[in-house]
Image: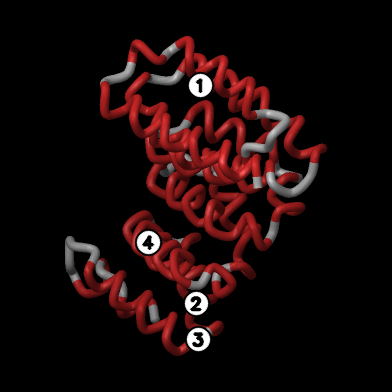
Amino acid sequence: MLNSIASALNRNDELPNIELAEKLIKSEDSIGIAEIASGLKMGKAIANDCIKVLYEIGQQKPELILPHAEGFLDLLKSKNNRLVWGAMTALGQITPLYPDKVFKRFDDLCVAYNEGSVITIDSSMTVFANLCRVCKEYEQKILPVLFKHFETCRAKEIPQHFERIAVGITPDSIEMFRIIINKRFEEMTKSQQVRVGKVFKSLLKGEKR
């Protein structure tokens, strides 16, 4: 399988990686996927291609990359930023299937969130939201991180990040999010305000059902 990734074909685009992911999804080839996962420990170009293949698989069938969850968690400490945000993307896909093991690495998640790129932070919102859904213990640990995030993040990030965490917002936490985001409402553009409003409306509808 490693001979089908972009760098092995002397390609600079992602199409070979996407096509390989589609092939592995259709065949549900666990051995082939494991071979791709082994590439994460190889040279930079190979590893970058392999993480792309894996999270492309995870987008459609996260259960196929679940056996490699520990590897993704380990990559959060990588010095290769591409691997860090790729791993966080994959973790966002598999956390609903693997929440307890992911939560055990909460400190590593927070370090990656605090030190990571914009894409790493985006995907960490998905991971945090999915963990909040599991139980009160997880929610109580994660909510302070999310509250601080919405107090300090760039205003233009609020709508997208609020949309990402919506699945993890409970009736008990929605009011605090409302207070925090209302304080920053004037910092957002009209379209951004509308997006945030739609999330609140959806959450309140769910609360009434």
Using the numbered discs, state the Cα–Cα distance from disc 1 to disc 3 in whole angstroms.
Answer: 41 Å
The kind of residue on which mark 1 rests is: Phe
Using the numbered discs, state the Cα–Cα distance from disc 1 to disc 2 in whole angstroms.
Answer: 37 Å
Residue 138 coordinates in the image, percent (x, y): 76, 39
The kind of residue on which mark 4 rests is: Lys
Q: Secondary structure at mark 2?
A: helix
Q: Residues within 10 Å of mark 1 (few under 14, many from 20)?
A: some
Q: Secondary structure at mark 4?
A: helix
- Image point (42%, 44%), residue name: 80
- Image point (47%, 44%), residue name: 123
Name the residue that disc number 4 marks: 52
Name the residue that disc number 1 marks: 150
The kind of residue on which mark 3 rests is: Asp
**Mark closer to the chain start, 4 or 3:** 3
Looking at the image, do the residues carrying marks 2 and 3 touch, with CB atoms under 8 Å apart? yes
Up-down relation of residue 44 to residue 116 (above or below):
below
Looking at the image, can residue 124 be seen? Answer: no
Q: Please give the label number shown on residue 29.
A: 3
- Image point (26%, 22%), residue name: 190
Name the residue that disc number 2 marks: 33
Q: Secondary structure at mark 3?
A: loop
Residue 154 coordinates in the image, percent (x, y): 38, 19
Question: Of residues 67 and 61, which is closer to you in this image?
Answer: 61
Question: Of residues 132 and 116, which is closer to you in this image?
Answer: 132
Question: Of residues 72 and 42, which is closer to you in this image?
Answer: 72
